Each structure stands twice: as C-alpha cells, then as structure tokens.
C-alpha cells in the first residue's frame, strides 16, 4: 500500500470521526434545548397559574367589597317586609284596606297575636307575569322597628307551599344578586343529583353535594365567584 493511499484512508477515518463528533454534539445541543424549553414552559405554566389565582382573588375581593357597600344600605330597609299573593288585596285597594287585610293575615295565618305597629303601601307589579299569583298587588309593610318585622320573618314557614310570599324589601341591586344565585342553584341541583343548595342572607349560595362537600358562592348580579367562607357563619361539619 502506497503512502498516499494510507494518508487517504487516515483522512477518511478522521472525517468520519469528525462527523460522529458533530452528530453527538448536535444531539447533545438538541437534548439540552428541549430540556431548557420544557423547563421554561413549566415555569411559564406555574407563573400563569399564579397570575390566574391572583386575578381570581382580586376579583373575589372586589366583588365582596362592593357587596359590603351595597348590603350596608339594606339597614334602611330592615324594618320592611314585602307580602304578596293575598287574594283580598286588589289593584284598587287603599293602604288602609291593605293594612286591615295584613293584620288579619298576621293574626290568623301567621299566628302572631302581638300588636305590631306598621304602615302599608300597595305596589302594582309592572307588566304581565307568567304566574297569576305574581300579578297580584304586593304589600310593603313598613314596621316601626326591626323586632316587629323579625316576628314576621320567623313565621315564613307558615306559608310554605302556599301562594303567599313573605320576602325582604331588597334594592334593585340585591334583587339582581338573588336572581343570579337562583339561576346558579337551579344549575347546581340539576347537575348534582341528591345535592342541596340554599341562599343565605340574600347574598350567598351555599351548596352541599350528596357526599357532604360544601361550597359557597357570592354574586354581584352579573358574575358568580366561589368564596372560602361567610364572615360570621360557622361552616357545618361533614
């Protein structure tokens, strides 16, 4: 074998070795790139989750703060009770006639014999309602003190499964909150068989699944957010 042939073979082996080294280096660079990319993606996902949590917490605080302000105004209406569904009250009934009917209703149906001091306003619902009972006039009873109005609230169970309703005198904002919570309650009980849900303080929805898991929601009338607890309310043990 000539010297030139040996040199050529040696050169070929060197080229092949260089190619193998380049391939190994490229493979290592690619693996390092993928590893760093995956690590960066993981960091971005964690950062995104953290930001989402912060936004949700900020939204929850904003909603709660607004409700604190809106529901503080309810103090002006604490003494009021709204009664609807009394057949004897007509569209042309005067406040004095309505008061006589309400007094009789309180004594005979609610079984409250105490003499309660209050005045009445007759409110005619606007528009045609789907249920006949909702077309009847609503009587706003303005009690002299909260103690008297609370006696009526305590007797709400007496009109369950009847066409008579005893409700709070809510502001338009509070009424929208209750409407949104009622929609959420209907959706929740439909999706979770055997679950229970009830509205608390006309501001929160407390849900409980068949396995005992309890969740609390709050609304501003537009959005609904889950909250950890209700101030002053001790959660039920599972």
Image (cartoon, rainbow, N blue to C red):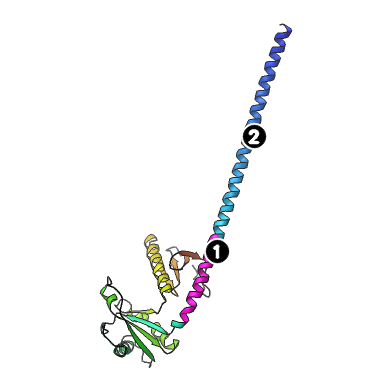
**Where is residue 135, by image quadrant?**
bottom left
Where residue 117 sits, quadrant-wise, is: bottom left
Please rate how many residues cluster around mark 1, counting C-alpha atoms within 10 Å: few if below 14, some from 14 to 19, many from 20: few
The circle on residue 29 is 2
State the residue at coordinates (40%, 65%): 184
137 on left or right of 222: left
- Residue situated furthest top in the rendering: 1
Q: Is residue 198 visible?
A: no
Magenta stretch in the rendered image? 55-75
* Local crowd size for mark 2, using a 10 Å CA cut-off: few (<14), some (14–19), many (≥20): few
Mark 2 element type:
helix
Provide residue 101's location: percent of width, then percent of height: 29, 88
Q: Is residue 114 magenta?
A: no
The residue under the point 25% across, 74% down is 132
Q: Position of residue 197 (x, y in %)?
A: 41, 68
On residue 4, which mark appears?
none
Q: Position of residue 182 (x, y in %)?
A: 39, 68
Q: Quick check: can you spot residue 26?
A: yes
Residue at the image point whose x is 55% and y is 64% from the top: 58
Name the residue that disc number 1 marks: 58
**In which quadrant of the rendered view does residue 209 lie?**
bottom left
Q: Vertical placement of 54 versus 35: above or below?
A: below
How far apart are the two marked residues, 1 and 2, measured between alpha carbons? 43 Å
What secondary structure is found at the residue carrying circle 1? helix
Between residues 143 and 21, which one lies in front from this camera angle? Answer: 143
């Amino acid at each position: 074998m000539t010297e030139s042939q040996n040199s050529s073979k040696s050169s070929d082996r060197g080229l092949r070795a260089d190619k193998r080294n380049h391939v190994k280096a490229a493979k290592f660079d690619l693996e390092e790139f993928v590893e760093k990319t995956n690590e960066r993606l993981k960091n971005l996902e964690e950062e995104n989750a953290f930001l989402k949590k912060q936004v949700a917490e900020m939204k929850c605080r904003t909603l709660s703060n607004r409700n604190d302000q809106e529901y503080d105004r309810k103090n002006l209406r604490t003494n009021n009770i709204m009664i609807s569904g009394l057949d004897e009250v007509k569209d042309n009934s005067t406040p004095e006639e309505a008061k006589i009917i309400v007094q009789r209703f309180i004594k005979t149906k609610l079984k409250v014999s105490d003499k309660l001091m209050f005045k009445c306003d007759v409110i005619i619902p606007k528009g045609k309602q789907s249920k006949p009972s909702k077309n009847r006039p609503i009587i706003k009873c303005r009690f002299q003190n909260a103690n008297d109005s609370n006696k009526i609230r305590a007797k709400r169970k007496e009109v369950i499964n009847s066409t008579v309703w005893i409700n709070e005198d809510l502001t338009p904002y509070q009424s929208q909150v209750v409407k949104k919570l009622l929609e959420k309650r209907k959706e929740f009980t439909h999706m979770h068989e055997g679950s229970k849900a009830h509205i608390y303080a006309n501001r929160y929805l407390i849900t409980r699944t068949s396995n005992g898991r309890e969740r609390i929601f709050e609304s501003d009338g537009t959005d609904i957010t889950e909250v950890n607890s209700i101030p002053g309310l001790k959660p039920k043990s599972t």
